[in-house]
Amino acid sequence: VIVSASGGARMQEGALSLMQMAKTASRLARIHEKGIPYISVLTHPTTGGVTASFAMLGDIIFAEPGALIGFAGPRVIRQTIGEELPEGFQTAEFLLKKGFVDAVVDRRHLKKSIDEVLKFYYA
């Protein structure tokens, strides 16, 4: 289980910090090969390279209600494409409707939800 919360790694922090996301994704591939489930939990915000690398690789992806999830923020995307974005764009609920996350789960219910997934995998 990885719980992500990130505004993204910045170039100013150096290449070493950016490389860690690729290393994490690589290790998750090894875990996947061994048949071990990876549960990704997305909190507010989960953006930038974390989203583009390991946060969206989960076998099961949970997101907290109202969490902002995406690579670039809505303002940057709006300026880039020159269009208004749909209401709720990049929220956990929007991504659930589009099939990018498996469930939106309040933090108070997260332990139970993770337990149910693990029981399913190891039944």
Image: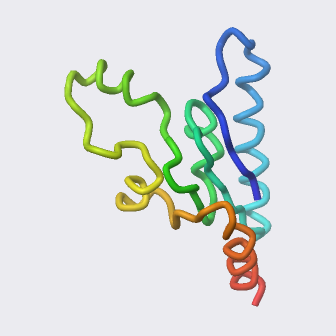
Residue drawn where x is 61% and y is 65% of the image: 60
Left or right: 1 in relation to 50: right
- Percent coordinates x, y for residue 23 in the rendering: 77, 37
List the single residue furthest toward the front. 108
Residue extending furthest left? 83
Place residue 111 in its image quadrant.
bottom right
Drawn side of residue 90 relative to residue 53, left or right? left
Q: Which colour scheme is used?
A: rainbow
* Residue pictured at 38% horizontal, 21% vertical: 76
Please state if 19 lies on the left or on the right of 70 as rendered: right
Identify which residue is drawn at 60% across, 31% down. 49
Asked where in the image residue 32 lies, by quadrant, the reply is bottom right
Given residues 50 and 19, the one toward you in this image is: 50
Location of the N terminus by quadrant is bottom right
Number of disc labels:
0
Identify the residue shown where x is 70% and y is 81%.
116
Q: Is 15 located above or below residue 59 in the figure? A: above
